[in-house]
């Protein structure tokens, strides 16, 4: 059996793609290794969303390319968004690449490897071949902890935000069939997964292309019936389509975490229009008010972009006032990245890099105070926590997460006097708060408040 190693970069959606590829290869008889020096075949699943992600992808490809001379590697495979976006440049600049596959060719990798011993360089570019997508995800090889998983419910995106290259790389939104998703969820639950993080490029649009009315709510309702499914968390919810029906369902179904990730990107109507977003500030405010009225304890997460072309000091101050007024639980701030192929690439009135960074830092300082205050309000509460085990870097500290904390992007709970096993969901009393993290200890008392 040939040994295969993989480096997966980028977002959770890329993680799911990588897990599906690994499962496909293992079921075909390949052996996996986590040590790149032992791998005969190395796969780099790249991200090409913004400049920093592209740089990380290229650096990783070059690092893996050295294994062809210094290690056992015979074949270097590059897949994913960067391969889709910069196909010829990668082939010209990095001759060590044996095969290049885009986001629509993942299922073809198994057949390519089965028929190529590494000496066939006649066709290194597979990006141009017809797209092919996995129908089933039940063979996924999990790379996350056994109790948590990402469930990708659609491919691509049909929005046309001026700053985003994703629709050109991944095509229009295509919802997976409910049957496929439910089969995957049932399979994952049988493996011990308790926490299901629902992802896509636009989660709230699920089912539109399948002519499903209230597709997301119907899907979640059916998922909630599966034995073993305990937490379902919604990520990447486009604000325009987060309607009353979805909000009502979240409020009524206890298995859906009171956590909604709604990337807003900006709040000033002039900027939203320039970004080609479909919402307005008034519409966003109405949606947030409805969320907090119907789900008072909901944790809200959003992202903003600073330095979009044409953003003035007044536009920025408007966004800062909005952030302080709305008091989101979690906020991510990104500086605008100029991406060739997007509408905004040709926009005038560029904002200097130092101004972008300064505005980002100002927003984060204000958000830090908001996050600390919100965490302090939790002190004394008894809440459910998903135990994750000992911290990878501080192996004497046991950690967990609340329903209001998504994996990898939000804070965590430091657990004291805890003897629970990873994957258990237990009641804890919050004893202390920091800027983003909490401290708690287990209690025998029942959970008092719904988050």
Image (cartoon, grey):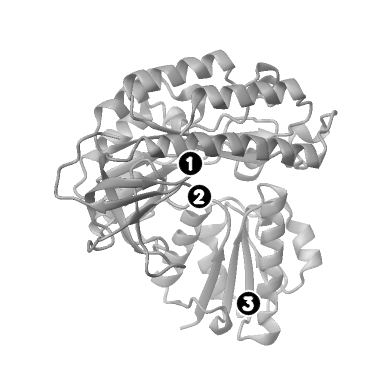
Left-right relation of 267 to 149? right
Q: Residue at x 52, y 19 (%)?
A: 284
> Which of disc 2 and disc 1 is earlier in sequence?
2
In percent of width and height, residue 361 lies at: 67, 40
Q: Earlier in the sequence, mark 3 or mark 1?
A: 3
Task: Look at mark 2 in the image and give the residue it sits on.
Answer: 13
Residue at 76 percent across and 64 percent down: it is 91
Give the image quarter of residue 395: bottom left
Q: Is residue 447 left or right of residue 39?
A: left
Say which element carries label 2: helix
Q: Residues within 10 Å of mark 1 (few under 14, many from 20)?
A: many
Q: Position of residue 97 (x, y in %)?
A: 70, 70
Q: Residues within 10 Å of mark 2 (few under 14, many from 20)?
A: some
Q: Nearer the viewer, residue 324 or 15?
A: 324
From this view, report whether residue 18 is shown above or below residue 302: below
> Cα distance, mark 1 to mark 2?
7 Å
Q: Which residue is mark 1?
A: 200
* Relative to 242, residue 206 above or below: below
Circle 3 sits on which residue? 75
Residue name at image x 68 percent, y 20 percent: 273
Q: Locate the C terminus and report the quarter of the image it occupies.
A: top left
Gap between marks 3 and 1 measured at Cα? 31 Å
């Amino acid at each position: 059996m040939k040994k295969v190693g993989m480096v997966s970069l980028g977002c959770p959606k890329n993680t799911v793609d990588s897990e599906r590829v690994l499962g496909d290869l293992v079921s075909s008889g390949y052996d996996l290794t986590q040590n790149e020096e032992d791998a005969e075949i190395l796969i780099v699943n790249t991200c090409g969303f913004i400049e920093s992600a592209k740089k990380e992808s290229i650096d990783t490809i070059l690092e893996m390319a050295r294994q062809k001379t210094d290690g056992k590697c015979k074949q270097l495979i590059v897949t994913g968004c960067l391969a889709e976006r910069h196909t010829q440049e990668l082939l010209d600049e990095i001759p060590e690449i044996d095969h290049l596959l885009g986001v629509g060719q993942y299922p073809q990798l198994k057949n390519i490897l089965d028929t190529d011993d590494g000496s066939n360089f006649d066709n290194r570019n597979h990006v141009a071949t017809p797209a092919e997508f996995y129908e089933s995800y039940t063979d996924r090889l999990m790379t996350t902890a056994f109790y948590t998983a990402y469930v990708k419910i659609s491919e691509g995106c049909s929005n046309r935000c001026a700053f985003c290259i994703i629709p050109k790389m991944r095509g229009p939104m295509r919802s997976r069939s409910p049957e496929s998703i439910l089969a995957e969820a049932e399979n994952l639950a049988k493996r011990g997964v308790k926490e299901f993080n629902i992802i896509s490029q636009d989660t709230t649009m699920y089912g539109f292309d399948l002519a499903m009315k209230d597709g997301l709510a119907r899907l979640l309702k059916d998922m909630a019936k599966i034995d073993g499914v305990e937490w379902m968390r919604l990520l990447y919810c486009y604000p325009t389509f987060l309607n009353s029906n979805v909000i009502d369902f979240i409020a009524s179904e206890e298995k859906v975490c009171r956590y909604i990730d709604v990337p807003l990107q900006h709040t000033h109507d002039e900027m939203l229009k320039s970004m080609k977003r479909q919402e307005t500030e008034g519409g966003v405010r109405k949606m947030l008010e409805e969320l907090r009225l119907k789900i008072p304890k909901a944790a809200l997460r959003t992202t903003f972009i600073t330095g979009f072309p044409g953003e003035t000091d007044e536009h920025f101050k408007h966004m800062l006032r909005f952030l302080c007024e709305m008091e989101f639980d979690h906020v991510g701030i990104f500086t605008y990245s100029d991406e060739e192929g997007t509408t905004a690439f040709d926009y005038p009135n560029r904002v200097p890099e130092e101004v972008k960074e300064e505005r980002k830092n100002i927003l984060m300082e204000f958000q830090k105070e908001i996050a600390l205050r919100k965490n302090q309000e939790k002190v004394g509460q008894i809440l459910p926590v998903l135990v994750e085990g000992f911290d990878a870097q501080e192996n004497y500290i046991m950690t967990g997460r609340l329903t209001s904390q998504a994996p990898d992007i939000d804070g965590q709970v430091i657990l004291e006097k805890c003897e629970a096993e990873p994957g258990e969901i237990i009641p804890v009393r919050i004893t202390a708060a920091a800027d983003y993290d909490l401290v708690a200890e287990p209690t025998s008392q029942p959970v008092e408040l719904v988050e």
